[in-house]
Image (cartoon, rainbow, N blue to C red):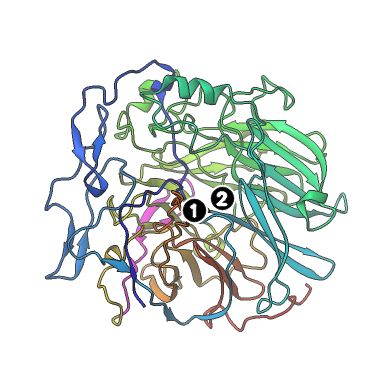
């Protein structure tokens, strides 16, 4: 049965982080600062700021019925909501598409309709899966992937100032003989500031928001987070303690990198000087930081690196970037360094995705002195997030890493986001080798281009290599791809990568009715598949959609393991 598409619903929760700028502290006034207005989604006006990209000219983008292909705009302003064009489906596609994949199970549980994080924990011979957002988490027993059991569900009432549940990494510390978890806390990326250029009072309120802007370290004493023992609290802002109600900076961004040993790597802005970023609703350009956590009760910052131009006072460097002043681009880190081999095991390099600042190779061999050794200015692709994820699971065997941003608009109303293959065999001279192929629909689909299917189309992430159990396959790379679901790339021949398999679930509108009949403005149509989590040791991919969790096996990775994996 076909479901009607309702373009009037508004989307207010996005999978992406929404960002900030150099001029954030300067008072601004006026709805559009004298900039021209432009037609936006559903015919609504978009108020453009000076320097903001103009709406693309009619006819310069859209679906071409003659070729069956969609041409993406060259550049766009931020314009949340639907942007249907001639050729877009008028309903939500209820079909499911599979190639070299099999659905083993489905759980109709959703932690975040448009975004969520995941982690696993092995405890007393059983495996547990966390699926969570900042306001809630769901804990599942996934020992038998075909019989998933809900262990705990917890929703947090937002306490004054602070998110309640942050992205975390949990590892066994052999030296301490304890399971240790590190959990990040960051200022909200949406809901606090609608437009920092026109609402200085919102900027001021965000800066004064009382909360821990940093990380907490716990001893894990059971799978249930509520049982964990707090060992320490650390603010990224060294001018304030974790106990100070108001701290500077962004806090700790996304999932921290921790190997259960001495060093902890996190991303974040440690103070308000890290402000050179364009995005209207975020104030900070994140840096990369490393801590000594050999004593989890007393973390010590060792060093920090940031992209040149990130800080107030570095405007001359910042202005060299073609994105400067566009009020649209995310600049700075969204995630910590991507590290293929831990420093404690002899690893020398980490790779940084720094949004509009580009791709960097960072020497981490001396954690007390992280230093930049190489940089690539990546192609401009405004709007959307231009540099967020780097897959490093193949670099040890192939010398290639895979760099990508992700879309933040619906109906392909932004430049097409690519996954770039970057050759780092000479880490001092990295170079873009090629791009991975763009997914295309199967022949039996009622559309010829995924841009017609509605919602967002483009890569999100390949999971989190630092926390996914087992040894990554050196040939196949699964990737979440929004309305194109799970896509599996074969990179055996780095010069000629191909798509070897996929699982594309049906499209569901996540808007729900409240008890008084009102529609909640949480439509997550742009993000039907927003995340994946790969169990390399069981050859399973967990696919997180806006309507539930799919457990997917694929012959490409090997025979799935239904039960606990063999101990090594």
Asked whether the beta carbons under mark 2 and mark 1 sit within 8 Å of each other, the answer is yes
Q: Nearer the viewer, residue 478 or 241?
A: 241
Image quarter (top left, top right, bottom left or bottom right) of the N terminus: bottom left
The image shows residue 542, relative to residue 327, as above or below, that is below
Residue 72 image position (x, y, % from top left)? 23, 55
Q: Is residue 165 magenta?
A: no
Task: Left or right? Give the position of 198 relative to 345.
Answer: left
Magenta span dominant secondary structure: loop
Q: Nearer the viewer, residue 143 or 398?
A: 143
Which label sits on residue 565? none
Distance from label 2 to label 1 (Cα)? Answer: 6 Å
Residue 55 image position (x, y, % from top left)? 20, 42
- Residue displayed at 12% across by 49% down: 58
Task: Left or right? Give the position of 199 relative to 450.
Answer: right
Can the viewer see residue 465 in this picture? yes
Callout 1: SS: strand
- Residue displayed at 40% across by 46% down: 385
Q: Which residue is label 2 attached to? A: 338
Residue 366 image position (x, y, % from top left)? 66, 39
Mark 2 vs mark 1: which is more N-terminal?
Answer: 2
Please rate how many residues cluster around mark 1, counting C-alpha atoms within 10 Å: few if below 14, some from 14 to 19, many from 20.
many
- Residue displayed at 37% across by 64% down: 436
Please rate how many residues cluster around mark 2, counting C-alpha atoms within 10 Å: few if below 14, some from 14 to 19, many from 20.
many
Q: Which residue is label 1 attached to? A: 390
Dividing the picture into quarters, in which one does residue 153 lie? bottom right
Q: Which residues are magenta?
A: 421-442
């Amino acid at each position: 049965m076909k479901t009607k598409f309702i373009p009037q619903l508004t989307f207010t929760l996005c999978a992406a982080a929404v960002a900030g700028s150099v001029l954030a502290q300067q008072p601004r006034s006026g709805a559009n600062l004298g900039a021209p207005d432009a037609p936006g989604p559903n015919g609504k006006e978009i108020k453009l700021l000076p320097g903001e990209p103009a709406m693309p000219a009619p006819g310069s983008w859209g679906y071409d019925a003659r070729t069956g292909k969609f041409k993406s705009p060259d550049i766009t302003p931020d314009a949340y909501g639907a942007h249907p064009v001639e050729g877009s489906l008028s309903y939500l596609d209820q079909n499911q598409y599979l190639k070299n994949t099999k659905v083993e199970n489905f759980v109709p549980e959703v932690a975040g309709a448009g975004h969520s994080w995941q982690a696993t924990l092995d405890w007393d011979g059983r495996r547990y899966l966390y699926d969570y957002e900042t306001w809630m988490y769901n804990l599942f027993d996934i020992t038998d992937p075909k019989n998933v059991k809900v262990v705990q569900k917890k929703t947090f009432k937002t306490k004054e100032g602070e998110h309640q549940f942050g992205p975390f990494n949990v590892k066994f510390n052999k030296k301490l003989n304890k399971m240790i978890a590190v959990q990040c806390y960051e200022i909200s990326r949406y809901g606090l500031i609608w437009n920092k250029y026109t609402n200085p009072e919102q900027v001021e309120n965000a800066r004064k928001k009382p909360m821990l802007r940093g990380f907490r370290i716990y001893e894990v004493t059971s799978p249930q987070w509520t049982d964990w023992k707090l060992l320490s609290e650390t603010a990224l802002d060294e001018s304030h303690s974790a106990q100070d109600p108001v701290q500077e900076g962004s806090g700790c961004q996304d999932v921290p990198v921790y190997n259960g040993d001495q060093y902890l790597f996190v991303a974040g802005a440690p103070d308000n000087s890290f402000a050179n970023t364009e995005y209207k609703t975020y104030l900070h350009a994140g840096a990369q930081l490393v801590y000594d956590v050999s004593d989890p009760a007393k973390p010590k910052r060792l060093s920090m690196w940031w992209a040149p131009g990130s800080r107030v006072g570095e405007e001359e460097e910042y202005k060299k970037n073609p994105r400067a002043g566009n009020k649209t681009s995310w600049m700075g880190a969204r995630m910590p360094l991507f590290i293929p081999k831990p420093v404690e095991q002899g690893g020398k390099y980490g790779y940084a995705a720094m949004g509009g600042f580009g791709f960097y190779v960072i020497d981490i061999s001396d954690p007390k002195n992280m230093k930049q050794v190489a940089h690539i200015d990546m192609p401009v692709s405004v709007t959307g997030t231009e540099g967020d994820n780097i897959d490093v699971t193949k670099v040890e065997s192939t010398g290639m890493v895979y760099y990508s941003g992700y879309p933040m608009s619906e109906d392909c109303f932004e430049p097409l986001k690519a996954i770039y293959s970057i050759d780092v065999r000479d880490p001092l001279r990295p170079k873009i080798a090629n791009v991975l192929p763009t997914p295309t629909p199967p022949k039996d689909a009622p559309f010829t281009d995924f841009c017609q299917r509605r919602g967002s189309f483009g890569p999100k992430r390949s999971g989190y290599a630092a926390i996914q159990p087992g040894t990554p396959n050196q040939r196949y790379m699964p990737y979440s791809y929004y309305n194109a679901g799970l896509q599996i790339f074969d990179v055996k021949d780095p010069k000629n990568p191909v798509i070897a398999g996929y699982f594309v679930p049906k499209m569901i509108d996540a808007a729900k009715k409240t008890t008084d009949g009102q529609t909640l403005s949480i439509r997550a149509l742009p993000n039907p598949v927003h995340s994946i989590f790969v169990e390399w040791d069981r050859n399973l991919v967990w696919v997180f959609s806006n309507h539930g969790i799919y457990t997917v096996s694929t012959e490409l990775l090997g025979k799935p393991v239904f039960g606990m994996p063999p101990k090594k």
